Amino acid sequence: MKIFLIFLLTINLNLIETFAEISIEVSIKEEEKNGSIIVDLRSYFNSLSFLNNSNGFIIKFARPCLNIYIDEKNSFIIRSLRIDREQFCPYEKNCYLNCDLFIEKEEMKLIKLKINIEDINDHKPKFKKNFYSYEFDENLSKGFRIPLEQAEDKDLSEKNSIKNYHLNVFNLTYFPFELTHDEKNHLLELILIENLEKKSENVKFLFELMVNDGENEEDQCLIEINILKTQHNNYLPPKFDLNLYKFFIFNLNETFIGKVHAKNSLNLNNQQIYYRIIPSIENLNLFQINETSGEIFLNRKQKINFLNKSYEILIEAFYLNHLSSLTAVEIYFNLTYQLNNPSNNNDEQENFIQILIPKLFHKNDNKIFLKENLSVPITILQLFISSSSSSSYSSYSLDMITSIEKDYFYLKKMDQQLFELILLKSFDYELIQKIDLDFILNKQNVTKKSIEIAIENINDCQPYFNQTDFFFTIQENNQIPFLLYTFQAYDQDYLNHIIYQIQTSDENIFSINSAHGDLWISKSFDRELQSNYSLLVCAFDGFYQICSSIYINILDENDNMCKFNSSSITLTINENLPSNINLIQVQAYDPDYEQNGTLLYKLSPKTSYLNIDSTTGIIRTTIDSFDYELIQTYSTLIIACDNINSLPSLCCYLKIYINIIDINDNFPYLIYPSSTNDVFIIDYSNKTMPRLQAFDNDLDLKNRFISYSIIGGSLNSSINVDYLSGQLYLLSTSTIPLYGTLIVSLSSQTNIQLTILLHDNQTDPQKFLMSIQQYSFSSQLFYFISFISIAIIIFSFITIFVILYFFKQKQKQKHDDDPLMNTPSTTTLSARSLVTTTTITNKKFYDTYYSFGDSVNPDIIHV
């Protein structure tokens, strides 16, 4: 019986109010370890007598309470599992947990336990990105607002959430922006507080945005604002390093002449520059150029006129959009030394150039290897001039021809025979891989010495991805293993293989192929557990590491069925409720997202008594109200379905039971006497009286209980009525003016009045008038004439019916004993209502008055 009572209380909490309630409010901090004690109930019940003996108590939850449980060894101690406030109350500043318990021994108590979950600062504010970049035109007006992305702090309590933002502008002397934070409207903005200064080039502001929470936990991100000139540089053509290039050719066996180079005016490496020779009549098809590298070659298929000692050609550098620029190239042919001094006559050569290479650098034949990014200035070559004759060296001059700009080198003369080649600018392998140097000693003949400088690559460039952030969307319940993406990093050094790594706290979910960059997912996602993930993908070239952010958003799938808190509920309501009265609001929970989690409610089957709001779940009454006299209990089914406009659509169910309470909405009424056929026979001699009978259509006992009383009329001093049964009885025979037998019947003429009051346990009566009539033919003369007539008839037929004499004698005896036949006076009864119109729904009348008869005249009533 006790278990059944607890079950009823969990369904209908209104019944709990019948028990003694004890309210306890406690506070606990989140992230406390499992098994932490919340409250010891004994400390709150020391004053209660029923706890004097602690044995034999039963303590149970009215319904399960999330993360809260009763100690198995001591049922008075309530413990909790670890609670993450941000998961339990993700959007509320105040977080409470309400639990109801019953404690029972000889009596039952209801304990209302309210647990306040206090926030601790277990999350720091965090920006979504480490770097934000913005570009604006220089014509921004004062007051221009730049909205910034705010940091996120999962701690929502006032003391632990985000407090303020501030800027670190480093060493900027000019910073025309001001930071504002509107916490109420959730706005973080930079406001331009003065007009921008006009510059001849683009202006960049690089600064740091910092955020703090209640305990000075902070995070920061870099923000770059680029102010662009109105006339953008992307309309400028590429630019040559030199306006005039000069190349010298000493040997026709070598086809390479030289190299021109143009720079991208935007300093963008991804904009390819192309080269071509502008044809002319003099140099038609004599030369060729590599369209991407700018290297110029002799065309072996064409004959060169050696009488022409030089040629001038024009070379165009352009983008694919045909924006171009020009440079001039002069090519000199000096073949005198080659023709006059064949290679088999080297012994006749008088001048020599000897190249000395420092041991610091590696060499191979006529090639020297220099690493890029050398510290400069540095001597890379020494040139020693010697001669087989005793000629003076003062008349000689040493010239150098290079395939790149000469401003990289400085040829320094140390004495009459010694020169040093000093490197002034370091090489960048990513731009230059090879340099050809020609040293020419001129007097009468030409002495030439050539050497090649090979640039060695070093790991001086970071690898990089083609974007800093990667965004992906994945449907939940994905198949595994699942290849999300193949990442590719780029490194201009081309020295080592790039190693790919990921940085994530979900190592059991994500893995990456370190050699190829394939990012695999090894878990099927459930959006209801976690809707997004973030991690870093990193590229490592052995020295430098660069990382990009990966953001994964899990798309929802309708894979969850909604749930109600219970399988059924019970309501108790009064009958005759008006329409549109809110009875209860039912709500089901569906963890799916948006349309997949949007529920619509309906009743099955549809009923004329109830309506339900399809979106809110509020159940209301209709114009057809419940009538307890027709129906006492009612049940229906509530169906909640999601995603009703497409498939699949999942539904859950809740059974609702309704108990109807009877109200006093019916009047009592007489059922005896009820018509003209009903007759009262009142015998004053033996005091036998009729019994009134009334009825009330209300079904509830307290509303249909009827009592009787007499409150007026000409006979009320002689006749009374039993309060409960309606039995009429005489008060005293001595006070009754009538004697013998009174025959009472219903009629429409009133001369004797008797008023009866009917009660149905309420006030506000409705009155009815009941009347008794008596006719004038009821007299002693009538009895005498009747007797003489009967005697004459008997004597007239005595001779004819002599055989039936004894039979007539017996009939006569029976006739004398019948009170209806011996009572010469008759009275009739009729009823009429004092209130002709009553409306049950607007007024409640619970008492009914009945009156019998009118005033009695002594000369009318006879014995």
Image: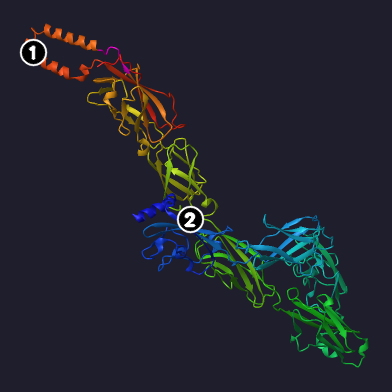
Q: Mark 2 and 1 residues: CB-CB less than 8 Å, in contact? A: no
In the rendered image, residue 851, in percent from the top left (x then y), is placed at: 36, 24
Q: Is residue 525 above or below residue 788?
A: below
Classified by dominant secondary structure, the portion drawn in magenta counts as loop
- Helix, strand or loop at label 2? It is loop
Question: Which is nearer the eye, 324 or 759?
Answer: 759
- Residue 317 in the magenta stretch? The answer is no
Give the residues drawn in magenta, as a range: 773-779
Mark 2 or 1 closer to N-term? Answer: 2
Taking 375 as reference, is 413 left or right? Answer: right
> Which amino acid type corresponds to the residue marked 2 in the rendered image?
Asp
Task: Name the quadrant of the C terminus.
Answer: top left
Q: Residues within 10 Å of mark 1 (few under 14, many from 20)?
A: few
- Tag 1 residue: 804
Q: Quadrant of residue 393?
A: bottom right
- Helix, strand or loop at label 1? It is helix
Q: Residues within 10 Å of mark 2 (few under 14, many from 20)?
A: some
Q: Quadrant of residue 422?
A: bottom right
In the rendered image, residue 324, in percent from the top left (x then y), is placed at: 80, 62
Taking 73 as reference, is 813 left or right? Answer: left
- Residue depicted at 13% across the width and 16% down the height: 811
Query: Outermost residue, left direction?
Result: 803
Q: Is residue 475 visible?
A: no
- Tag 2 residue: 559
Q: Is residue 758 visible?
A: yes
Q: Is residue 783 above or below residue 448?
A: above
In the rendered image, residue 691, in percent from the top left (x then y), is placed at: 28, 28
Q: Is residue 803 above or below residue 421?
A: above
In the rendered image, residue 763, in percent from the top left (x then y), is placed at: 42, 34
